[in-house]
Image (tube, rainbow, N blue to C red):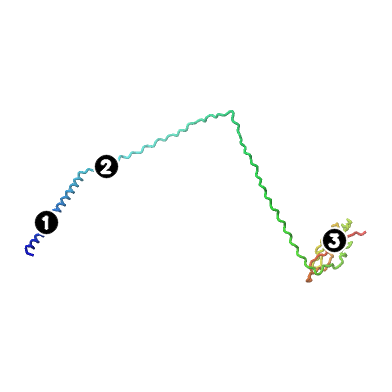
Amino acid sequence: MAYADQKMSGGKIVAIVIVALIHAALGYAFVTGLAYQYVKKAQEKLNTFDVEEPPPPPPDEPPPPPPPDQQMQPPPVVSPPPIVRNPNPPPVTINTVPTPPPVYIPTPIAAPPAPPAPPPAPPAPPRVAVKVSPRSNPGNWFSNDDYPPAARRAEAQGRVSVALTIDTNGRVSDCRVTSSSGNQDLDNATCSLAKRRGRFSPAKDPNGNAIESTYPLPGVRWKLEN
């Protein structure tokens, strides 16, 4: 490259830089001037705007006084209308309701009571291997000397049959009249003498043990002497 070309290139660069600075200065002046005018106009508007104060509130008015108490007036007295009586009142009709007859409710019949249970069967009598027997003649247990005085005065006579219960010792423990003479004194004397004088050999079972038994006394005849 020639020296002239190098000189020309350096001059161009300087010229460009100068032009750029001029443009920058002009732009700054332009911007600054516009801003100043805008601020000035805004200040003028603020200076010319009038602000009115709001009017003061009205003073508080006191509430109206309460109305005076009014006396209650009594209601007017209204007289009742006169009662007009009918001289010929209609007859009073009474409707009677028939009373229904009572409902018959049959009384339930109670079931008959159950029959009483039969008494338990008596125990079977023990087997007798040896029968009871009197040790002496029963006819000797009774004599005319034993005749009851009351029966003698009544001239009572008769035949008495009894059943004697003989215990294991051979003595008469009980006496039951099976056929009466018709006189209570003769019946009682027969049992009393049999208990007092009767002696027996007791009955025995197959093992030879003495057992209780019954001995029938067919008849004791009571007869007065002439």
- Residue wearing tag 1: 19
Comes first in the chain, label 1 or label 3: 1
Direction bottom: furthest residue: 207
- Give the quarter of the image for residue 194: bottom right
Q: Earlier in the sequence, mark 1 or mark 2?
A: 1
3D distance between C-alphas at marks 1 and 3: 189 Å
Residue 200: which quarter of the image? bottom right
Considering the image in quadrants, where does the C terminus appear?
Answer: bottom right
Residue under label 2, please give it: 54
For marks 3 and 2 on the same chain, the one whose residue lies earlier in the sequence: 2
Q: Label 1 crowding class (10 Å Cα cut-off): few <14, some 14-19, many 20+?
A: few
> Is 52 positioned to the left or the right of 160 in the image?
left
Image location (x, y in percent) of residue 68 = 40, 35
Kind of residue sitting beneath label 2: Pro
- Residue 92 position in % (x across, y down): 60, 33
Q: In the displayed image of the protein, which residue is found farthest to the top?
A: 87
Q: Residue at x 10, y 59 (%)?
A: 12
Q: Amino acid at mark 1?
A: Val
Q: Nearer the viewer, residue 121 or 145?
A: 121
Residue under label 3, please give it: 161
Classed neighbour count for the residue bearing mark 3: other residues with Cα under 10 Å, few (<14), some (14–19), many (≥20): many
Nearest to the observer: residue 16 or residue 71: 16
Q: Nearer the viewer, mark 1 or mark 2?
A: 1
Q: Residue at x 61, y 34 (%)?
A: 93
Q: Name the foreground residue: 216 vs 78.
A: 216
